[in-house]
Amino acid sequence: MDFTLSERDRMLQKSIREFAEKELPPRMDRMEETGEFPLDLLEGLAKMGILGVITPREYGGSGLGHLARVLVLEQLGRICPAIPMSLEVHHMCVYGINTWGTEEQKKKYLPALADGKTLGVFAVTEPGGGSDVGGTQTTARLDGNDYVLNGRKCFITNAHVSDIWVVAAMTGEGRKGMSAFIVEKDFPGAGTGHVEDKLGLRGANTGELVLQDCRVPKENLLGGEGNGMSVALETIVKCGRTGMASVGLGILNAVLEEAVKFANERVLYGKPISRLQAIQFYLSDIYSDLEIARLLAYRAGWLLDNELPADAEATLAKQWICEAAARSARKAVEIHGSYGILKEYPVQRLLRDALVTVPAGGTAEIAKVVLSRQAMS
Amino acid sequence: MEMIVCIKPVPDPKQAGKMTIDRETGTMIRRDVPSVINPLDRHALEASVRIRERHGGRVTALSMAPDDVLPVLKESLARGADRLVLLSDRRFAGGDTLATACVIAAAVGHLGTFDLVMCGDETTDSGTAQVSAQIAEFLDVPNIMHVDDCGVSPDGDLRLHSRNEEGAFTAEGQTPMVVSVTADINEPRYVTLMDVLDSEGKEVLILSADDLPLEESWIGLEGSPTRVLELFEPERKSRAEMLSGTPAEQAAVLADRLRRLGFRNG
Ligand SMILES: Cc1cc2nc3c(=O)[nH]c(=O)nc-3n(C[C@H](O)[C@H](O)[C@H](O)COP(=O)(O)OP(=O)(O)OC[C@H]3O[C@@H](n4cnc5c(N)ncnc54)[C@H](O)[C@@H]3O)c2cc1C
Ligand SMILES: Cc1cc2nc3c(=O)[nH]c(=O)nc-3n(C[C@H](O)[C@H](O)[C@H](O)COP(=O)(O)OP(=O)(O)OC[C@H]3O[C@@H](n4cnc5c(N)ncnc54)[C@H](O)[C@@H]3O)c2cc1C
């Protein structure tokens, strides 16, 4: 068993860290205020190879894989978690098309999803309930050479900043009644609804997709008719949850750094509060959460790279890490006393960001349903 | 153009606070601080890579360092160097600037003909700013320091702009030469994920003292006339004091203190 990162992994970690430290902070105030994703960052994200980290090289990506993706998202999340939130769903779109797409679909869409012109969307959740994927109400009816889609998707990451959407819709009844489609923003009948005004991860765009007699050419069916459930679940579980785990991991990095910094700077009774054992215990808790989170997230990435079963592991990583990020951020806020609730201190944002990661990509309760099944198997 | 960029691993300046001094041996304890390529050497590397991109040629990154920092130095390959040459030998240890320059110059000679050797002006760890001039002296070629702009003229000469506290000048000259650069020369590019991948197939050459035409008396501790007598942290006397009261009260106290320290209005 080898827990060391390769030379390559360490080098890419360092290069993304540098990029993140320089490029993200100048954009963050605006992201917080407006709730908008900084589109001017896309070109840089493309050039760095971040958009295409899991896209094979022949389709314009760097093809570095899932552990590399975890490392990249972690480093970005250490500075600004809203960025990896957007990217993790973008990668889900890439994952879906790369795993189930035909050669033509891959050639057409994957390069466009790596070169910085747009982000991708992966849309399953509907107003009728995110946990109940089988309850999807969006329909797709074959009409000549087109499918005609009707329905609404909500809580969709990148909804308003994406030209390429993977959308789940019902072509029939039951488990085998779901199909996935690649929908272009400019297809007739494709549109967006309102933007969600979120508590945290504000710089990640989240909103509605509206499909009104939206005509999608037959060749844009993804993974064959009736396979939509597999496309949706595998992408959410493997790619989505590992991605959300990485966002949470990024947050934990920032939480520990902010907590330590404040504890060392704040002087009470003539010495820094980091000398108080109560504060040290908080720091020890946060540090432990970070270290365990790292093991869980890296393992999930590594399992995927090695094509080993990873469903339970990715679910565990996501659920445990996002909860850990929230509880550790809460402790970091405590360490800050009242300063923790002031806007000029990042910890309050980290707490808000962490809380938003918890339901995204599947709620904690759903994760427990999955994990209990694994426990009893 | 055949270019050689000298790169030195230094303790990460961003984590300099973690560095301590061993009072008994008078040496720096670096183990808690990861190494990085000396920041100015990244600018030198970028300058060479840009020349190669416009005018062709080859960029060799060259370093004298213990071989355990090889992974750190490999970043030069991701930053665009075509190959990396590491000069590593226990006998090089303890070298001062003269002994360092001697080894580097011998390696430059060993690698064949060259047009340009590029260094940083100085390092962040000992910062003597001597090595580039000494390399030039050993190689018997011109040296220009503080270079903040460089280019190649149509007839293949180097055009260099140099600035120091006293003034600035532009020089044009024939290669070969040794130059050292300031941070103003460029903004080093980001290393992309593709750069990391592409760096993996590049050549890494490790040379020891035996590979180079060197006399033992010129290298390492023996070849170093300089002795560092003592290493100490400058004492920091400043202490923060928190003022209390309303903003107006605090301002009054502050103004009074400043006046007593000798600051005057106007
Ligand atoms: C920031 C963010 C980004 C998102 N991005 C996307 C995206 O890009 N694409 C996308 O498709 N979706 C996205 N989502 C949606 C997300 O996946 C859903 O919100 C999530 O699955 C929960 O669905 P829901 O909000 O409808 O809650 P519901 O499903 O209505 O759940 C309500 C409550 O019931 C509990 N519950 C439900 N079922 C069970 C059960 N079987 N056992 C026990 N408890 C249960 C839940 O845990 C929860 O507490 C995003 C969400 C967020 C917050
Ligand atoms: C605390 C401390 C104090 C020291 N004081 C002295 C001193 O007073 N006098 C003295 O002679 N030595 C001194 N040394 C030794 C000195 O660190 C080495 O000689 C070193 O190899 C070169 O000196 P520099 O870092 O000052 O280089 P500089 O002359 O500041 O470096 C200029 C450029 O030369 C190139 N370069 C320098 N070293 C290397 C290398 N090893 N490999 C490749 N390129 C390189 C780089 O491009 C660099 O940017 C000291 C060392 C320490 C740790």
Image (tube, rainbow, N blue to C red):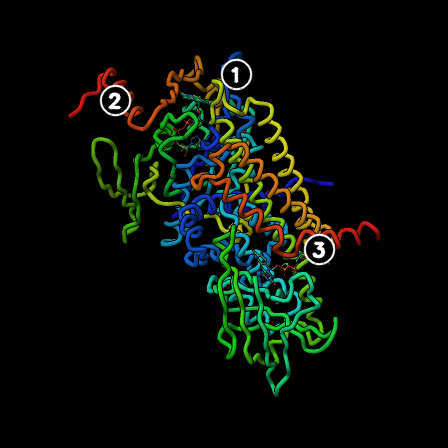
List the residue tagged with mark 1: B22
Residue occupied by mark 2: B255
Kindly identify which chain the residue marked by label 3 belongs to. A
Find residue B225 and report its image quarter. Answer: top left
Q: Earlier in the sequence, mark 2 or mark 1?
A: 1
| Distance from mark 3 CB to nearest ligand 1 atom below 8 Å | yes
Taking the image as drawn, is residue A112 in sight?
Answer: yes
Picture coordinates of residue A101, whole percent (x, y): 63, 70
Q: Is residue A316 above or below residue A174?
A: above
Q: Report the quarter where the N terminus of chain A lies.
A: top right
Q: Is residue A201 above or below residue A126?
A: above
Q: What secondary structure is marked by label 1?
A: strand
Q: Is residue A272 left or right of residue B246?
A: right
The CA span between labels 2 and 1 is: 42 Å
* Outermost residue to the front: B246
Contact between marks 3 and 2 (CB within 8 A): the answer is: no
Three-letter amino acid code at the position of disc 3: Ile
**B169 left or right of A43 in image:** left
Q: Which residue is mark 3?
A: A366
Comparing labels 2 and 1, the label whose residue is closer to the camera: 2
In the image, the residue with mark 2 has its CB under 8 Å from the nearest atom of ligand 2: no
How busy is the neighbourhood of tag 3: few (under 14 within 10 Å), some, or many (20 plus)? some
Amino acid beneath label 1: Asp
Q: Quadrant location of ligand 1?
A: bottom right
